[in-house]
Amino acid sequence: MLIGVQTDAFDRIQLFTLTNQAGTEIKVTNYGAILTSIRVADRNAKLADVALGHHSAADYIHAVDKPYLGAVVGRFGNRLADGSFTLDGETYSLAKNNGPNHLHGGDVGFDKVVWDAKSIQGKNFSGLELTYLSKDCEEGYPGNLACKVTYKLTEANEIVMEYHATTDKATPVNLTNHTYFNLAGEGSGDILDHLVHINADHYTPVNQHLIPTGEITPVKDTPFDFTVEKSIGLDINQENEQLQFARGYDHNFVLNKKGQADKMTLAATVYEQKSGRFLEVLTEEPGVQFYTGNFLDGRLTGKAGKPYLNRGGFCLETQHFPDSPNQPTFPSTILRPSETYSTKTIFRFSVKP
């Protein structure tokens, strides 16, 4: 039996709390569909919040640099080169909100809108269903896009995120969750000692503007080889052009799908040795963006009242590849009126002795 869902309302912005019998607690707001908090136990059954975030909607709205903490990003997560794409012979111009690029849906992406929300219950989960209609031409994108994002907290200590969308006109869609994790606890310092495994033999290198070059490159004998578990900090400061472009890791990894493109696959694992907390990320997506908080700089203060230092959190953003509408060799992100966008990602928490 699940303990359930608690709701706090402030005008249309609400905060929902989901809990399970293990004592795990997550909080989600319908502002930006943001996952604001994840409280999970360590090997000694001590709970800590492992997601970077804020206590109030106002803190998210006024945050320095607005780093998308915990948000659902879209209509197109990640970067689009030169803020444009061409679809069915028509070129669409979008906001350039990241240097010369369009990033995470534009000036007012899905992370900055208020979603409709309702609580849901199942046999082994409590959950939240969020819906949003992104209107034709919103942020420059074609088509009315009806979106639904569902968060479920299960008794298996999983956060299951399901994404669905339909459109009345062809449009790019690439939705993901932008949670920053620190498995030692948010605000507890950097994440360089976390041990990471990424199930990817290849990655997509980028240019100086962090746009993929179009190549799919082996990770072997590079700092991007996480096929064998290693600490984030082991190679992050190597003299490597790709690391210098991004000030660390901020790259898309091409997941090993073994010919089963849409099947649920292990994307990555992360282990924090002092607490024993262990995170597994599973997804139906073809890629994952591994980002190491390179642009956090201490100006943001988190829920524990501590600054979020450089590399104070990591993201594993499951996704189609960045700039896909402009990269014909990448898996397509175009959704057409006869189709339904549907994808699932799971964050699974456990401990090692």
Image (spheres, grey):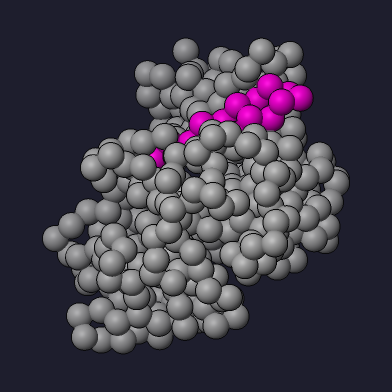
Task: Return the x and y of residue 239 as percentages of the image width and height.
Answer: 70, 62
Residue 244 lies left or right of residue 143; in this view the side is right
| Residue projecting furthest to the left | 338
Q: Who's the residue at 31% across and 86% down the image?
A: 91
Seen in the picture, residue 158 relative to 88 is either above or below; the reply is above
Judging depth in this view, the residue of 284 and 140 nearest the camera is 284
Q: Who's the residue at 36% across and 42% down the image?
A: 256
Residue 133 lies left or right of residue 46; in this view the side is left
Judging depth in this view, the residue of 246 and 113 nearest the camera is 246
Q: Who's the residue at 55% across and 83% down the image?
A: 100
Task: Return the x and y of residue 162 as percentages of the image width and height.
Answer: 37, 42
Magenta stretch holds residue 278: yes
Residue 195 lies left or right of residue 254; in this view the side is right
Seen in the picture, residue 259 relative to 93 is either above or below; the reply is above
Task: Return the x and y of residue 68 as percentages of the image width and height.
Answer: 61, 58
Residue 51 sits in quarter: top right
Magenta stretch holds residue 161: no
Instruction: Give the residues drawn in magenta, as a range.
Output: 270-283
Residue 179 lies left or right of residue 64; in this view the side is left
Judging depth in this view, the residue of 90 and 62 nearest the camera is 90
Question: How would you classify the magenta stretch by its main secondary structure?
Answer: strand
Task: Return the x and y of residue 215 as percentages of the image width and height.
Answer: 39, 66
Seen in the picture, residue 135 relative to 48 is either above or below; the reply is below
Residue 246 sits in quarter: bottom right
Q: Who's the residue at 35% across and 84% down the image?
A: 92
| Residue projecting furthest to the front | 221
Look at the image and tell me in which quarter the C terminus lies: top right
Residue 300 in view in this figure: no
